[in-house]
């Protein structure tokens, strides 16, 4: 479990904000919930905030039931237990699968949702951690191949023996779904934090940009900096989020490299992606973490629709040029701004 920085649990709160002269200016409604194995917070401003947050909570629980890999009745369980037979799933599941398939291709396989049996062997699905034997990992990896998953409308087929998990994308997709609900309720100012995935709608009620903290992977209770954003998702994948220390004294974390089935160790300890679409940013943050520093910079240069903040395992900090002006450092850590037209 992570994101212990959200300390206020369970409960909702409706509060009128007061202007300087004491008039009620705007209603804010917040909710703290636990879903998808993490703490979440929703905050919406404006007259429709109360019903918007209520509907958003219901939608989160609905997506949790649909996309969970452990819930007996979820679409993902149905796919994983179908033994290669076609399964009819919800439009939400098809959409998340499509994002994952696209990112699998764009990242040359770094994002791979069919690693679930390997994740289970490491104990990341239960918390009963262990270091699997090399031949056990190699055998399980033989069944990991996202290109074998096919969808025809809402009918999905996954080969027998393959199991998928949408943990790398589901929270980003859920954030997008929450933002759609906010817009239906005509909310123009909202911020949500779904287990470290921050998504913002519009600007703060006073018109200023939202400030989102970027965790220091070497000291997760502190920030390396903040970014100022409006209408953007700010989504981080890091090696400090879920890990265990093995009997050999090494740290093993929850993002695996499909190339060998071991925790991805390609020069990065955290990747923050800033962009318009939560599902895409979530898929990207995991994919870029696996790709490693150089490939991630190449991927950014090819794409053009997101910005990123990389922290390297040797303590370096890289910002892409489109986010540099919106970044405020909170540590002495020097950083390099990567330009679109330069060699990495
Ligand atoms: P978090 O869920 O901690 O915010 P991520 O979005 O990076 O972080 O997703 C990590 C989760 O994705 C893991 O817990 C696991 O379920 C799954 N996963 C691990 N490695 C990969 C990978 N290479 N491709 C796709 N999913 C992965
Ligand atoms: Mg992700």
Image: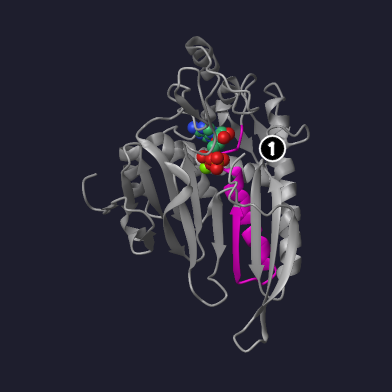
Of residues 264 and 76, the one drawn nearer to the viewer in this rendering: 264
- Report crowding for label 1: few under 14, some 14 to 19, many 20 or more residues within 10 A (C-alpha): many
Farthest residue, direction left = 343
Q: Is residue 177 magenta?
A: yes
Task: Report if residue 291 is visible in the image.
Answer: yes
Left or right of 60, for residue 124: left
Residue 291 place in picture, x, y as percent: 39, 35
Residue under label 1:
68
Residue occupying the point 54% across, 35% down: 242
Total number of numbered labels? Answer: 1
Q: Quadrant of the C terminus?
A: top left
Of residues 8 and 47, the one drawn nearer to the viewer in this rendering: 8
Looking at the picture, does residue 334 appear above or below residue 102?
A: below
Task: Report if residue 217 is visible in the image.
Answer: no
Give the magenta part as a residue range.
Answer: 165-193
Left or right of 238, for residue 50: right
Residue 234 place in picture, x, y as percent: 49, 54
Of residues 149 and 235, the one drawn nearer to the viewer in this rendering: 235
Looking at the picture, does residue 8 appear above or below residue 217?
A: below
Farthest residue, direction right = 73
* SS category of the residue bearing label 1: loop
Quarter of the image for residue 328 reads: bottom left
């Amino acid at each position: 479990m992570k994101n212990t920085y959200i300390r206020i649990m369970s409960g909702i709160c409706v509060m009128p904000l007061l202007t300087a002269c004491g008039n009620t200016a705007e209603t804010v409604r917040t909710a703290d919930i636990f879903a998808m194995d993490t703490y979440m917070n929703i905050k919406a401003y404006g007259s429709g905030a109360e019903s918007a947050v209520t509907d958003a909570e219901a939608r989160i629980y609905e997506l949790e039931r649909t996309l969970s890999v452990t819930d007996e009745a979820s679409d993902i369980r149905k796919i994983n237990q179908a033994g290669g037979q076609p399964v009819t799933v919800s439009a939400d599941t098809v959409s998340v699968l499509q994002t994952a398939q696209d990112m699998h291709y764009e990242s040359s396989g770094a994002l791979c949702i069919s690693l679930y049996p390997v994740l289970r062997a490491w104990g990341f699905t239960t918390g009963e951690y262990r270091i699997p034997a090399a031949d056990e990992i190699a055998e399980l990896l033989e069944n990991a191949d996202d290109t074998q998953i096919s969808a025809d409308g809402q009918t999905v087929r996954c080969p027998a023996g393959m199991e998928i998990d949408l943990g790398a994308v589901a929270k980003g997709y859920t954030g997008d779904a929450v933002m759609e609900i906010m817009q239906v309720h005509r909310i123009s100012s909202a911020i949500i934090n779904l287990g470290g995935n921050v998504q913002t709608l519009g600007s703060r009620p006073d018109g200023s940009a939202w400030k989102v903290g970027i965790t220091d992977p070497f000291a997760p209770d502190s920030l390396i900096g903040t970014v100022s954003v409006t209408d953007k998702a700010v989504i981080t994948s890091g090696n400090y989020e879920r890990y265990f220390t093995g009997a050999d004294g090494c740290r093993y974390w929850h993002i695996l490299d499909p190339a060998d089935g071991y925790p991805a160790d390609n020069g990065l300890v955290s990747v923050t992606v800033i962009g318009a679409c939560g599902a895409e940013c979530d898929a990207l943050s995991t994919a870029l973490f696996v790709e490693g520093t150089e490939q991630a910079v190449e991927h950014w240069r090819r794409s053009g629709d997101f910005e990123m903040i990389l922290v390297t395992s040797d303590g370096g900090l890289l910002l892409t040029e489109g986010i540099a002006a919106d970044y405020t450092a909170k540590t002495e850590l020097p950083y390099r701004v990567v330009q679109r037209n330069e060699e990495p």
